[in-house]
């Protein structure tokens, strides 16, 4: 299973359930603080440490960590937003473990430690940092944050003002939205999740092979191409053929047994000059596409399909077939004037893969008015009645029932023309092989990101599919 993601509110509820079963809050605080100390000491074994503590639970974790680090003979100085005499509850108990002086927070501004532990405010912060805390956030330095970087809202993933830029963040039981969604994830650095004995139940997960490795198609030695599924990709006109070819080739690389390019007759010659293993078939009308769709496992329509009424009719015809359908690009934009007409035809096993602009054309200001990107994708999936993959460096995949996955396994080099067309093909290639659409999207998003990571600078869309065999071979355990 991938790493679970909890909102701050869900984390509080999970902790309360633990308390109701007899475990006290201070016990969890000790586990958390000691984990912070052990992580810091293991990864940064040298240098002076400045621990910045707030007045609540996050600060309590900091006091526990400071005491533990002192036991490792580390040079530690503690600074707090409040006098120790004003701390209450578990934070006061934690402060009592620290045997050294507790300095005023503003005094930290005149020091230059090798490492800073930011234990000021946790994921539930809802107001901007002020005074010395804000100044310390702006000062910089090598920062290890506890829970989330102080100044970042753990739920919305947005900085509320000045925020600490962490080299690493240590959190507990599960990830928070701020760790995986932009812009918060850019402040979080590397994320370490520590088990402190809080059971987690959630419908939101981080994407990784742990989530779906068992669902990767495993063709047997006696299998033939017809048993591996037939993907069909709809092409645009003669001046708009490249995007569909990127999609089709990626679907074949992903493992579909057969891939057919469905082309307007006037574009067939262009395709014929470029296609080899991918078959080519003509279509002229929406009825032609409906006939092809009836004999398909999965279909893709949208990449450079054309912004015209014909594309709209083609989409409607395909959605009446038993094939699972992936809609992208033009297949989404042609419904911008009447999204409801599209939504009423979509099925839970279909998927749309919009970028932010395409998303806005169908769902208006939902992305900007939602609490975060996950909630926007969930609301869109529920409204559209299908799976929604909202693209980006923090791609979110959501089902109508609220299950969602966040894919952070990506790279800036994927921001190149045609990259999304390749992603559509990878996903559809797995759909064609019978993989559940939601899992196919998760697999495709991760593979797409891994290909970008492996290739690196200079990547163009055509490179992505060429990297896939090595990645798939490693996942199947077939590397040398």
Image: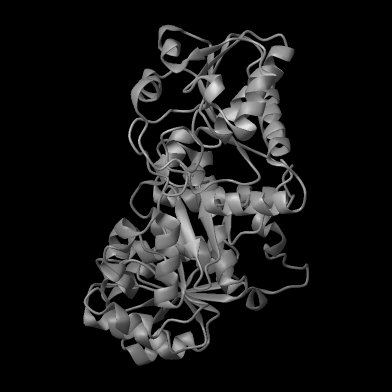
Q: In the depicted view, which residue is nearer to us: 5 or 239?
A: 5
Would residue 31 be seen by someone viewing this image from the given angle?
Answer: yes
Indicate left or right for 170 with 1 as reference: left
Above or below: residue 266 compared with residue 151: below
- Disc tally is 0
Residue 132 location (% of width, % of height):
38, 20
User: What residue sits 64% from the left and 19% below the top?
Assistant: 66
Residue 183 location (% of width, % of height):
39, 42
Location of residue 327 by image quarter? bottom left
Q: In the depicted view, which residue is nearer to us: 115 or 69?
A: 69
Indicate left or right for 369 with 308 as reference: right
Q: Quadrant of the C terminus?
A: top right
> Farthest front residue?
85
Above or below: residue 142 compared with residue 311: above
Above or below: residue 228 compared with residue 413: below
Above or below: residue 381 compared with residue 357: below
User: What residue sits 43% from the left and 51% below the top?
Assistant: 462
Q: In the depicted view, which residue is nearer to us: 162 or 236?
A: 162
Location of residue 312 by image quarter? bottom left
Residue 232 location (% of width, % of height):
47, 76
Residue 164 location (% of width, % of height):
43, 28
């Amino acid at each position: 299973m991938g790493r679970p993601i909890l909102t701050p509110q869900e984390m509080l509820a999970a902790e309360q359930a633990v308390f109701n079963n007899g475990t006290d809050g201070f016990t969890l605080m000790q586990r958390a603080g000691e984990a912070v100390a052990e992580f810091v000491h293991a990864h940064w074994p040298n240098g002076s440490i400045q621990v910045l503590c707030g007045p609540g639970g996050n600060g309590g974790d900091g006091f526990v960590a400071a005491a533990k680090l002192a036991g490792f003979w580390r040079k530690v100085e503690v600074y707090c937003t409040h006098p120790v005499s004003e701390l209450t509850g578990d934070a006061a108990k934690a402060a009592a473990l620290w045997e050294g002086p507790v300095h005023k927070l503003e005094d930290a501004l005149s020091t230059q430690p090798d490492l800073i532990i930011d234990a000021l405010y946790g994921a539930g912060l809802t107001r901007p940092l002020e005074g010395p805390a804000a100044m310390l956030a702006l000062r910089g330095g090598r920062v290890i944050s506890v829970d989330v970087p102080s100044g970042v809202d753990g739920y919305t993933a947005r900085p509320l003002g000045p925020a600490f830029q962490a080299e690493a963040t240590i959190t507990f039981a599960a990830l928070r939205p701020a760790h995986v969604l932009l812009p918060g994830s850019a402040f979080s650095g590397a994320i370490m999740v520590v088990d402190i004995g809080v059971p987690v139940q959630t419908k939101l997960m981080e994407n990784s092979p742990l989530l779906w490795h068992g669902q990767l198609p495993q063709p047997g030695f006696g299998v033939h191409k017809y048993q591996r599924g037939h993907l069909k990709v709809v092409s645009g006109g003669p001046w708009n053929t490249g995007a569909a070819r990127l999609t089709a080739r990626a679907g074949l690389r992903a493992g579909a047994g057969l891939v057919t390019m469905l082309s307007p007759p006037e574009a067939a010659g262009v395709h014929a000059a470029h296609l080899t293993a991918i078959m080519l078939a003509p279509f002229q009308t929406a009825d032609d596409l409906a006939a092809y769709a009836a004999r398909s496992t999965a279909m893709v329509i949208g990449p450079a399909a054309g912004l015209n009424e014909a594309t709209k009719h083609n989409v409607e015809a395909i959605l009446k077939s038993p094939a699972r359908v992936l809609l992208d690009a033009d297949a989404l934009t042609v419904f911008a004037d009447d999204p409801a007409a599209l939504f009423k035809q979509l099925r839970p096993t279909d998927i749309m893969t919009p970028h932010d602009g395409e998303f806005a054309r169908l769902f208006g200001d939902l992305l900007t008015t939602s609490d975060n990107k996950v909630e926007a994708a969930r609301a869109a999936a529920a409204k559209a009645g299908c799976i929604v993959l909202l693209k980006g460096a923090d791609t979110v995949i959501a089902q109508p029932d609220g299950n969602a996955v966040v894919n952070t396994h990506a790279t800036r080099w994927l921001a190149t023309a045609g990259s999304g067309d390749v992603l559509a093909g990878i996903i559809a290639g797995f759909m064609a092989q019978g993989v559940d659409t939601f899992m196919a999207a998760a697999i495709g998003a991760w593979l797409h990101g891994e290909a970008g990571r492996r290739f690196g600078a200079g990547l163009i869309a055509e490179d992505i599919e060429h990297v896939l065999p090595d990645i798939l071979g490693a996942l199947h355990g077939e590397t040398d």
